[in-house]
Image (cartoon, rainbow, N blue to C red):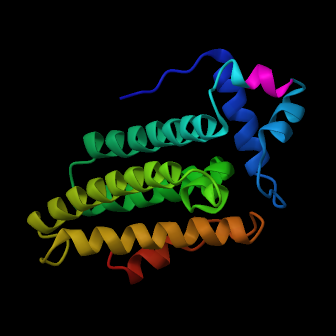
Amino acid sequence: MATHFSAKQAAILKTLSAMLERPDAGRITTAALAHEMGQSEAALYRHYSSKAAIFAGLIALVGDQILEDLTHIAITEAQGRPRLRKQVHALLLFVERHRGAARVLTGGALAGEAPALQEQANALLREVERMLAESARLGMEQGELPGGDAGPRAEVLLLYVLGRWLRYAQSGWQAAPTGNFRQQLELLGL
């Protein structure tokens, strides 16, 4: 289900994401966000009730985009193994294109924030893992992947993706998530 934002809310989320993309981004305050936008904190609070609500909006926006990408791949790719490869590639590529998402989805930007935000990010990651498991299950049913439980395969793939995202953020955006991904997926059996 797509989340809808006003133009002002979207501008706030875009600015927050841009701030998170800076290699030296530390903890972001509403004062810093307001300053970046050339507004007062009160102006931000007219659109979001709290800093947690701003981060929750960013997580929802990122989640909508990621799940839309994964769903599109699931609809357009009938073979399980290629579907799984494309979904993993889409996850890696998403963060290359939206660097701020890396800091949010790996928890770095959420450290010290409301615990509900990390739970919201975790819920998104569980949904991503569920979708990866569906693709893995299809690949096993079609004989493209070794049999067994699709859950552990999806978990390993999600951990791989999270590791690549984290490395990207920690490297100051130098270690691209898609670097050598084809060879790495072969090592993972894809």
Residue 135 is drawn in which quadrant? bottom left
Quadrant showing the N terminus:
top left
Viewer-closest of 103 and 76: 103
Image position of 182 with respect to 51: above or below:
below
Say whether residue 22 is left or right of residue 131.
right
**Does residue 66 appear to the left or right of 70 in the view shown?**
right
**Highlighted magenta segment, given as a residue range:** 40-44
Query: For the stretch drawn in magenta, what is the main secondary structure?
Result: helix
Image coords of residue 72 (percent x, y):
35, 39
In the picture, residue 166 is in which quadrant? Answer: bottom right
Q: Vertically, is 151 above or below 189?
A: above
Relative image position of residue 43 (x, y in whole percent):
78, 20
Assign the C terminus to one quadrant of the image. bottom left
Considering every residue shown, the one lying at the far bottom of the view is 187
Q: Is residue 95 magenta?
A: no
Residue at the image point whose x is 65% and y is 16% from the top: 7
Q: Nearer the viewer, residue 79 or 40?
A: 40
- Of 86 and 124, the residue lying toward us: 124
Q: Percent x, y for residue 51?
A: 67, 38
Q: Residue at x 44, y 53 (%)?
A: 119
Q: Position of residue 49 (x, y in %)?
A: 62, 27
Q: Total of numbered circles in the picture? A: 0
Q: Is residue 9 left or right of residue 64?
A: right
Whether 43 is among the magenta residues is yes
Residue visible at 60% across and 16% down in the picture? 6
